[in-house]
Amino acid sequence: MPNSKYSFQTISMIGLGYIGLPTATLFASRKKKVIGVDVSEHAVNTINSGKIHIVEPELDMLVHAAVTEGYLRATRTPEPADAFLIAVPTPFKGDHKPDLSYIESAAKAIAPILNKGNLVILESTSPVGATEQMSAWLSEARPDLTFPQQAGEEADIQIAHCPERVLPGKVVHELVSNDRIIGGMTRKASEMSVALYKIFVEGACIVTDARTAEMCKLTENSFRDVNIAFANELSMICDKLEINVWELVELANRHPRVSILQPGAGVGGHCIAVDPWFIVDTTPDEARLIRTAREVNDFKPEWVLNKIKAAVLDTMATKQGSTISDIKVACLGLAFKPDIDDLRESPAVDITRNLAALGCQIVAVEPNIEVLPPKLAQANISLATLDEAVETADVICVLVKHTPFIEAVETLRQHAYCIDSVGIFA
Ligand code: SAJ
C-alpha cells in the first residue's frame, strides 16, 4: 500500500526514452498527472499525439490511453511537480569513462523549478557517487534550498537512486512486477520513493543507500557480462579443440549447480556492454575479472568476422577467376539480440559493416526491420528475405538467433557454407 504520509499529485519524468516513457505512462495509467520532459521535439510531438517514438510491446496502447485521458503530457521545458524522476542516457566516453553530462543537464534544467518538499530520483544507470554528484549540482544551482548532503533527513529536497532493471521487449510487464532497489540519500528519501513507486510497482521495494543501489545495478549487468564472457570464451576454446560448444554447454548444464549462458556473436545493447566499465573506471586495480570479461565479449565479433573472412577466401579459391566482389555473403540478423528490432550497439551490425568493407556483396536478413540503418546504407549491402538470401549467397552467417531462422534450420543446414555463431544447429 502507498505510504499515505506522502502524496504525489504531479510527477515529472525527465527523459522519455526506453525507460522514461513506459515509467511515465504507468504513473499516468494509475491516474497521476504526469509531465514528461524530453529535449527531442520529435519525441514530444509524437507522444502528445498519443503515439510512441520507440518500439516496445504494449506501450503504444498505454500511451494512447494516458494522453487521450489527459494524464500524460510531454513538453521540452520542465514544469513544477511533486516528484522528479531522471531517466537520461549515461554512455561512456572514448576512454570508457562515464559521461554524466546528460544527468548534469537534467539537474540544471529542473533546479530552477524545485520546491521545498520535492523528491528527485535518479533512475539512469550510474557510477557509484553519481547521485551525490547530482545532488551537489542541484545544490549549487539552488543555494536557497537545503539538500541531503547538508541537512540529511531535514533537507528541503530529498534525493534517491532507484535504478531501472527491466528487459527491453518486456518493459511494461517487468516495470510492474520486478522488485525495485530504492537507494535514498536519507531514510526519508527512501520512504518517499517507496511511496512513489508503490503507485504502480507490484514487486517488492527494497530500501538501501544510494551508493549500494548504484553498485547493485552495475553488479547485475556485470554478472551477466562475466557469465556471457565465460560462454564466449568457451566457444573459442572449443573451436580450437574441435568440440561442439553448444552440446558441451547443454551437457555441463545438466550438473545441478552449473548454468552456463549461450555463446553468441558478441554482447550488444546499451547496458551490458557499457555498465561494467563504470566499475572498472572507479576501481581499475580491483576490477580485473570484470575488465577481462568486457574484453572477451568485445573481441567476439572480431573472432566471428575472421571466421567469415576465412570462408569468403575459401569460396573464392573454389571459384576460378573470382574476385572478392563476386562473393555474396548472407548476414542473418542485425538486431542486438533475438526477436527485437533494436540495432543499437549490435555486434551483428558491426560484423556486417566490416564484411562489406572487404568488398563482398552482402545480403542482410533482418525480419524485424523494413529499411537498413544509416550505418549500413551502402551500395554493396541490401536487405533481403531469408529465402532470397539462402538461394543466392555463397556464404551464410547466422549472427542472431531470431525465431524465423530457427524455423528455417533444415534449409540452412543444407547450404554448402553456413557459419553458425549463435548455435542454431545445436
Ligand atoms: N547474450 C548472449 N548470451 C546470452 C544472453 C545474452 O550473448 O546467453 C547477449 C545478447 O544477445 C545481447 C546482450 O547479451 O547482445 C545483452 O542482452 P541481455 O538480454 O542479456 O540484456 P539487455 O541488454 O537486453 O538487458 C539487460 C538486463 N540485465 C540483466 O539481465 C542483468 C536488464 O534486466 C537490464 O534492465 C538492462 O540490461 C539495462 O537496462 O541495464
Image: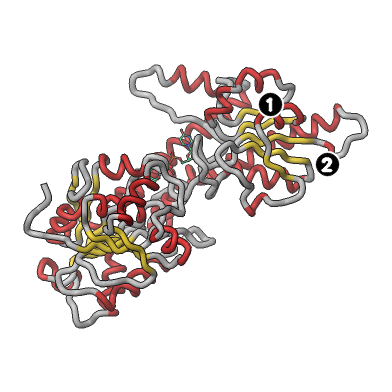
Extreme residue toward the right, this view: 321
* Residue at position x 71%, y 38% in the image: 363
Up the image or down, 307 lies above or below 258; here it is below
Q: Is residue 116 left or right of residue 410?
A: left
Extreme residue toward the left, this view: 5
Quarter of the rendered image showing ligand 1:
top left
- The residue wearing badge 1 is 418
Extreme residue toward the front, this view: 68
Report the Cα–Cα distance between label 2 and label 1. 19 Å
Place of residue 142 in the rendered image (x, y in percent of width and height, measured from the top left): 25, 80
Q: Amino acid at mark 1?
A: Cys
Place of residue 319 in the rendered image (x, y in percent of width and height, measured from the top left): 87, 29
Up the image or down, 107 lies above or below 322; here it is below
Q: Residues within 10 Å of mark 1 (few under 14, many from 20)?
A: many
Q: Is 99 or 390 nearer to us in this picture?
A: 390
Q: Going from the N terminus, do you reach mark 2 or mark 1 first?
A: 2
Q: Amino acid at mark 2?
A: Ser
Quadrant where the C terminus is found in the figure: top right
- The residue wearing badge 2 is 325
